[in-house]
Amino acid sequence: MDGMRWDAQRLDLEEPSTLPGMPSIRGLLRSVQVPEFPGLTFHEVRAKSALNHVPGESAMPFPWTINPYRGCSHSCVYCLRGDTLVLMADGRQRAIADLRVGDRIIGTECRGTYRHYVTTEVLAHWSTVKPAHVVSLADGTEIVASGDHRFLTAGGWKYVTGTESDIGQRPSLTRDDTMLGFSRSVEAEIKRKYVAENLAVDSAADLRVVTVESLGVDAEMYDITTGTGDFVANGVISHNCFARKTHEWLEMDTGHDFDSQIVVKTNLVDILRRELARPSWKREHVALGTNTDPYQRAEGRYKLMPGVIAALADSGTPFSILTKGTLLRRDIPQLVEAARRVPVGIGVSMAIWDDALHTALEPGVPTPRARLDLVRALTGAGLPCGVFLAPVLPGLTDTTEALDAAIGAIAAAGATGVTVIPLHLRPGAREWFMAWLNRAHPELVPRYERLYARRAYVPAEYRIWLAQRVAPVLAAHGLDRQSGGTARQADGAIAAGVPGDEEVGFPQGSLPTAGLPGVRPKGEAEPGSAQQDSAAEQLSLL
């Protein structure tokens, strides 16, 4: 993998000078624990680059991203080592560390009694530090993964390791379990060229498990979320991290859900200034918050964002921030100054509005009202702020009264736009949510089973119904023409307010307005922006 253009971003490569017992993270300076963040370990590193380029084929409305922190802040542990090869849609393979949101890869889906290879997309990508295990197969394939990662076998999905006690036992890999896929042989190289053509999954290669061994060290691991819930890793079918989506779509980001290992790019600002000063830099839109929240708890200690904001503004680079962290209030004065110089967009995600539901489903996160105060502070300072109202729960928060209360409060806070997003139930989130629903609202279980019978998204009929319900509420609060969400009706017309399965509008204000800096006097409407009307996929923090 020498010479890959993403090597500068990779933290999985072993640092020769790593001391015994220390995580093998490239560029590691030190690992620290501090009293104000009990249970968290910060791995301070020196990164080699700051800007990440979004693949050209992605429909995301920005070409560049910055992630000050690497590490799953949502307690994700289903990870693979960075050099694990993932099968791309064109038949090539790429290291998982080098993947980016929007990349087209191969996953699988069940059709009747058979599973077929299909093309899917990377929806999220991140890293964390976990104990490493190596799984060896009969054909010579080796995969380094965390103990909590799952692979598809002839006997179903199985974890790399079991639990340490009889409590919460789970199926795990044992000797002679047969994985599904096509290995890394020469024959497999030929076959990979055709997997995008819906071939059925078989196990012609000898993919029997020979050994599963602990390496005795912690290592930088990577994982992705995909549209199908799985992907092909080193020639075998691997489960993606559904835990990530559980927290993204339901926002169940409890205090203890922050992962215990956070990688901090301590030199990020210096590297960013150097990259922005290059003659080749075109001052294109840079997005923050598309992977991990830049205002997560670690930011309270390391304070990287003020330097990032200053570097972008000083270089004349437009930027946007997506967050659910109220720590952003600290930087409002600096954002006001930056917005006088460059276009700035700010998006805030706001989840369940009902207090009782919030307590049940989102214990420990900033309340919707706390985030509403953030919106009010932003717009009160003259900054644009678009709000993602998500998720809307069928039968619970989709009444006219509930929508009117939420959208009315958002409008009163001065939000420049709203996108309303119905609940998505991907694998993992589905099981968790349905178990909760069965306890709290058993009368709604049959309806949810019908709505989510075939896929993670609600059917078009519900989206159309919700769009028609949302439209007059948005109009009543003066937000109908400012919302970027859309849902296509049966007759082909567009109903404002609710995105489709693969389309999510970015609300007015969440993306930098082309041409002019973003600060405007309070009360003055911001002109509409066509670029904010649609996007291919929801961002990872929602």
Image (tube, rainbow, N blue to C red):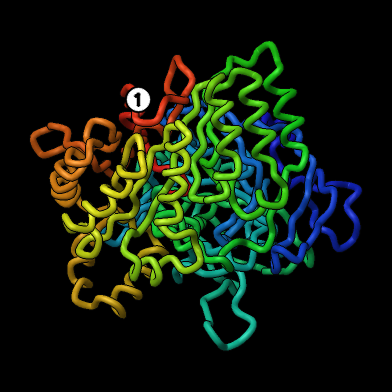
Q: Is residue 518 above or below residue 498?
A: above
Q: Is residue 540 visible?
A: yes
Q: Is residue 191 visible?
A: no
Residue 467 x, y percent position in the rendering: 18, 44
Comparing 133 with 294, the one in front is 294
**What residue is drawn where x is 67% and y is 26%?**
311
Comparing 468 with 339, the one in front is 339
**What residue is drawn where x is 64% and y is 19%?**
315
Q: Residue furthest left?
A: 491
Residue 373 x, y percent position in the rendering: 44, 50
Q: Is residue 225 above or below residue 256?
A: above
Count of labels in the image = 1
Q: Residue furthest bottom?
A: 166
Instruction: Please indicate whether residue 80 sits to the left or right of residue 395 in the image.
Output: right
Q: Quadrant of residue 163?
A: bottom right
**What residue is drawn where x is 76% and y is 53%?**
43
**What residue is drawn where x is 61% and y is 23%?**
313
Instruction: Please indicate whether residue 450 sits to the left or right of residue 218 in the image.
Output: left
Mark 1 lies on a secondary structure that is loop
Q: Is residue 442 above or below residue 1?
A: below
Circle 1 residue: 526
Image quarter where the N terminus lies is top right
Residue 301 x, y percent position in the rendering: 71, 52
Residue 36 x, y percent position in the rendering: 72, 63
Instruction: Please indicate whether residue 533 sits to the left or right of residue 310 in the image.
Output: left
Q: Amino acid at mark 1?
A: Glu
